[in-house]
Image (spheres, rainbow, N blue to C red):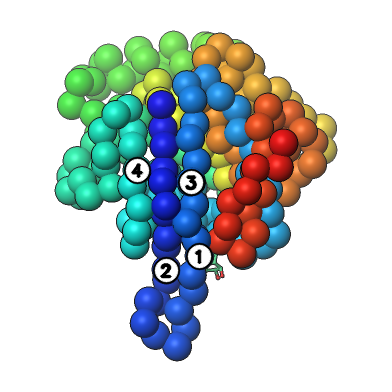
Amino acid sequence: MIRVTHIDKYYNRGKGSEVHALRDVNLTIQQGERIGIIGTSGSGKSTLLKVLGLLEVPDNGDYWLNDENVVRSKEKEKANLRSRQIGFVMQDFALMEDRSVLENVMTPLLFDRRYTWRKAKEKAYETLHRLSLEDLAKRKVSQLSGGQKQRIAICRAIVNDPLLLLADEPTGALDSRTAAEVLHVLLELNQQGQTLLIVTHDSQVAASCRTIYRMEDGHLQKES
Ligand SMILES: Nc1ncnc2c1ncn2[C@@H]1O[C@H](COP(=O)(O)OP(=O)(O)OP(=O)(O)O)[C@@H](O)[C@H]1O
């Protein structure tokens, strides 16, 4: 189970440009859940994702990841948790364009001491196979379509069997047909047990989530 309680996050605290991006945010994510977060631009959605992904430290509150309070963990420990427990999918794919698909998918495992290069390659192939993408393994990312890139990005995000898969506008850069294909991949992974949290502007994506929250000026409220 993943839980954040009473989270506050400020940017530029104490300065004229101070932004109170998250205000007393509470969220519990049960294993296998599929959560959608909607809200207007600038309301704090990405900031919440960054806190959950251990990329931003909140100013107040606690973050429980598998019964461990990780809010004050050291940077090294957080980097470890990030590489083992969290998967990220971003709107712009964030892939290494001049590298092969295989190299991209292997990358998270190369930071994980449990994997030798050979084991990482095996696991990357296994994960590509799971998403029926193994035929693309040797292709350079720059030669792929947007939909293929996003499916590769999803593959890279789940290669470490993360506890939580975080997706920030995963269909935002795709046309509607490709977006539907990418959404299908995410939903299928969730049906196989992958806990999933999606930030989205896309009403179709939001409607596909079992639980929807709305972020409004830093406040998170359950919508349905
Ligand atoms: N690094 C930063 N430094 C200062 N302010 C920031 C920073 N990142 C975000 N903000 C501010 O925090 C608030 C919340 O931003 P956030 O990116 O979380 O919103 P969002 O809901 O994800 O928006 P969008 O839908 O446009 O991506 C905004 O007012 C934004 O300008």
How dense is the environment of label 4, judged by Cα within 10 Å: few (below 14), some, or many (20 and up)?
many
Pointer 4: what residue?
63
> Picture coordinates of residue 83 (x, y %)?
31, 34
Which residue is painted at 61% across and 64% down in the image?
217
**Disc 1 residue: CB within 8 Å of ligand 1:** yes
Please give the label number shown on residue 139: none
Image height check: is 49 above or below 36?
below
Pointer 3: what residue?
26
Please tell me which of labels 1 and 3 falls first in the chain.
Answer: 1
Pointer 1: what residue?
21
Which element carries disc 3, helix, strand or loop? Answer: strand
Instruction: Identify the amino acid type marked 2.
Output: Tyr
Which residue is painted at 26% across and 33% down in the image?
68
Indicate the quadrant where residue 66 lies: top left
Please give the label number shown on residue 10: 2
> Picture coordinates of residue 145 (x, y %)?
67, 36
Please tell me which of labels 2 and 4 falls first in the chain.
Answer: 2
Please tell me which of labels 4 and 3 falls first in the chain.
Answer: 3
Please tell me which of labels 3 and 2 falls first in the chain.
Answer: 2
- Between 71 and 157, the one lying in front of the other is 71
Judge from the rendering whether residue 12 lies leftward or rightward of residue 214; answer left or right: left
